[in-house]
Image: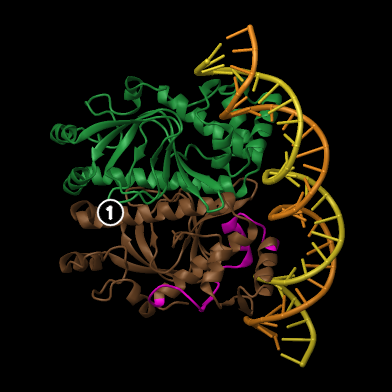
Chain colours: A brown, B green, C orange, D yellow
Amino acid sequence: MTKHAKLAPSACGECPIRHRAVCAKCNADELAELETIKYYRSYEAGQTILWAGDHMEFVGSLVSGVATLTQTMEDGRTQMVGLLLPSDFVGRPGRDSAAYNVVATSDVVMCCFRKTPFENMMASTPHIAHRLLQMTLDELDAAREWMLVLGRKTAREKIASLLSIIARRDATLGMGVATGRVVFDLPLTREAMADYLGLTLETVSRQISALRKDGVIVLEGKRHVTVPDMDRLMDEAGDDSDGGLLA
Amino acid sequence: MTKHAKLAPSACGECPIRHRAVCAKCNADELAELETIKYYRSYEAGQTILWAGDHMEFVGSLVSGVATLTQTMEDGRTQMVGLLLPSDFVGRPGRDSAAYNVVATSDVVMCCFRKTPFENMMASTPHIAHRLLQMTLDELDAAREWMLVLGRKTAREKIASLLSIIARRDATLGMGVATGRVVFDLPLTREAMADYLGLTLETVSRQISALRKDGVIVLEGKRHVTVPDMDRLMDEAGDDSDGGLLA
DNA sequence: TCGAGGCTTTGACCCAGATCAATTAGGACG
DNA sequence: CGTCCTAATTGATCTGGGTCAAAGCCTCGA
């Protein structure tokens, strides 16, 4: 999907480590140290990267691909609680196990930092600690934003919310704010969307069809989406907010 | 409600500042410094403590009473995204405005620290920064736990989840894990419960009646609840998890 | 003691979204 | 170029929870 190079603008263009997670201020010494504890991992679509409760040996960030955080009840009902897109952070500094299943939705490449050295570094460099706190607060805001979607929005509004979040995210990766015409590929199956939105996949399909019929979106194939008018979509989402979601 | 003194055991019993938020390691110097920037505020039931977007001049923790974090859509639909009970933390270190409305559900006393000095202190004392990160991660886990409740549970399970969380919380304030018989007072109106659970107040009322009829809970008046068998309640909640929620 | 007004409960009915069940695309591959 | 397999669409029907409406029940103040 998204190539590493394509990511750079949204992260930091001036240092060798391109991930927002760690290059808040680009101190050369810290970056050099980070390089020494860095490695890459890749996963295939469908593979579970971490099971809830698993010991975590790294923290890192997505380089390419899409992964989801999911929670499952014994009877099989599942709820996605976060969507990880390139440059998103994976891991819980200071915790030694995963809280949720992390599943690769497409082929995934992740940039990992070994956990203990990373945490030591965090303890000694306040601005990294601060950056992590801010990122965690962002995630918390996003999660709470999503609680409103799950608890109070209709199926149509839920779909529009999800589409506008993905569109916005994709568009701003390129640069600037998403307005007017936006084009992107859905990184999720209908079932994954349903799990995210607390719906069934049939309802997701029906509502997408309805939005298409009403001209809010244009579909080519199953995944390629054109939004002719971003404002219209945001309106359908019943959304005053300006961003949010995405772990 | 809960008196400050009653809180001490759940916080730190060995230092003059009893709030979990800040006494992670009880360094005397830090505590003395905290004392100099500390003050109290109180609010009446129903009063809005902060509006979303408000400038925040303090961070602090609840001493007594109950407050809620709520989000509202233009058409009036509202979703509660967090429940603040005594010892819970209020504020977003490093941010200068509130993300959600904070509303006092009962009369509230809050212990506040002036924001700038508190943040300076945080920047200079890594263990406080670390503690805040851990608390934020707890909140994030709780929020995501709640996403499962909102997205996938039935009305009955939602009610049981809320009751078991409040029961557990109340019981463990006293000490130990909540099992067997548990007694507590509901700190929320039916409407507030509905806003928390993404239901209507009528449905909340009906499901509470149903749980009473089935002997899962016993009610005296509208608010005083006895849970004869905590395991039974957790079972109704469809919950394998062990805690969670509560900002 | 008696209202008045705010919670709460309960009933009757309805509808958005779930469930069950076919069909219909798209690929990937021989 | 078929054919197999999985994702997606579409239809028919059912139901959990919403909506509207009418009592009940505390509490507080006169």
In the image, which residues are magenta? A174-202
Give the chain letter at badge 1.
Answer: A
Residue B18 position within the rendered picture, expressed as x and y whole percent measured from the top left: 28, 28
Quickly name the residue at label 1.
A116
Query: What amino acid is at disc 1?
Result: Thr
Q: Is residue A10 above or below residue B31?
A: below
Residue A128 position within the rendered picture, expressed as x and y whole percent measured from the top left: 24, 57
Taking C14 as reference, is C6 left or right? Answer: left
Q: Identify the image quadrant of residue B84.
A: top left
Q: Identify the image quadrant of residue A40.
A: bottom left
Closer to the camera in the image, A6 or D13: D13
* Residue drawn 24% across the image and 38% down it: B113
Q: Is residue B197 magenta-colored? A: no
Closer to the camera in the image, D12 or A243: A243
Residue A165 position within the rendered picture, expressed as x and y whole percent measured from the top left: 49, 65
Closer to the camera in the image, B76 or B190: B76
Q: Is residue A197 magenta-colored? A: yes
How crowded pointer 1 is (Cα within 10 Å; few <14, some 14-19, many 20+) is rated as: some
In which quadrant will I find the C terminus of chain A? bottom left
Q: Is residue B239 above or below residue A87?
A: above
